[in-house]
Amino acid sequence: MKNIQIILLCLTCSFFSFAQNESDLTFSQLDKSPLDVVMYRDANKAAVARVIYSRPSKRDREIFGKLVPYNQVWRTGANEATEIAFYKDVKFNNELVKAGTYSLYTIPSENNWKFILNTDTTQSGLEYDASKNLITTTMDVLPSPQEIESFSISFVEQNNGGMLFLGWDDTIASVPFTVVNP
């Protein structure tokens, strides 16, 4: 009986040791650019848009023009392609975007950015097929009043639609949109 207790004690200790090592391995490999979701609702609290994206951090790096090169397509975040869903038809610069889910890409430059909605939503963040672009429009760029450590996306309601903001480091880019049938 004593031998059985010793064997059970050894097995239990081995299990907990394995579990501890397994959790160390699992959590040590957590993503350094965590996933985030931002939801935009209209004044009546009806869903208009949702963005799912990863939030890389600055970590004392030079961001725009260096880590994120100017005049090249950027996945607009980290890891997988940023996904934006519209629950109502919207217009960007008079270009109709039907309710649905798209990938969001940008092309940053020093003075303005290009905002791109792409119909391919299953590619990784490093894949980009320009032939699947739905719209491309210009974003305004302005300096951030304070440094933004982690890349962030937000919405602000305005005149039958909203303004989409992308901010990181010392830069904020924005693009307005309207809801077709509010």
Image: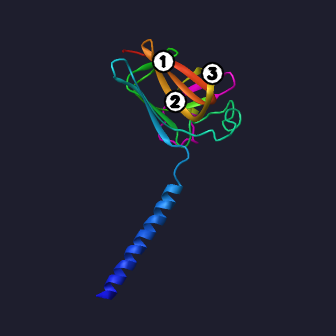
Image position of 3 (left or right of 40) = left
Q: Which amino acid does label 2 sit on?
A: Ile
10 Å crowding of disc 2: few (<14), some (14-19), many (20+): many
For label 2, the residue is: 153
10 Å crowding of disc 3: few (<14), some (14-19), many (20+): many
Toward the viewer: 131 or 22?
A: 22
Give the answer, above or below, for where 156 lies relative to 57: above
For the C terminus, the image quarter is top left
For label 1, the residue is: 177
Q: What element carries label 3?
A: strand
What segment is highlighted magenta in the picture? 107-129
Q: Which amino acid does label 1 sit on?
A: Phe
Q: Which mark is residue 141?
A: 3
Q: First in sequence, mark 2 or 3: give its number.
A: 3
- Name which quarter of the figure residue 76 lies in: top right
Image position of 162 (left or right of 126) = left
Q: What element carries label 2?
A: strand
From the top left corner, tell me how far across and down residue 69 is, in percent: 69, 35
Q: Is residue 128 a member of the stretch shown in magenta? A: yes
* Nearer to us: label 1 or label 3: 3
Q: Is mark 1 on a helix, strand or loop?
A: strand
Judged by its main secondary structure, the magenta piece is: loop
Q: Are marks 1 and 2 in contact (CB under 8 Å)?
A: no
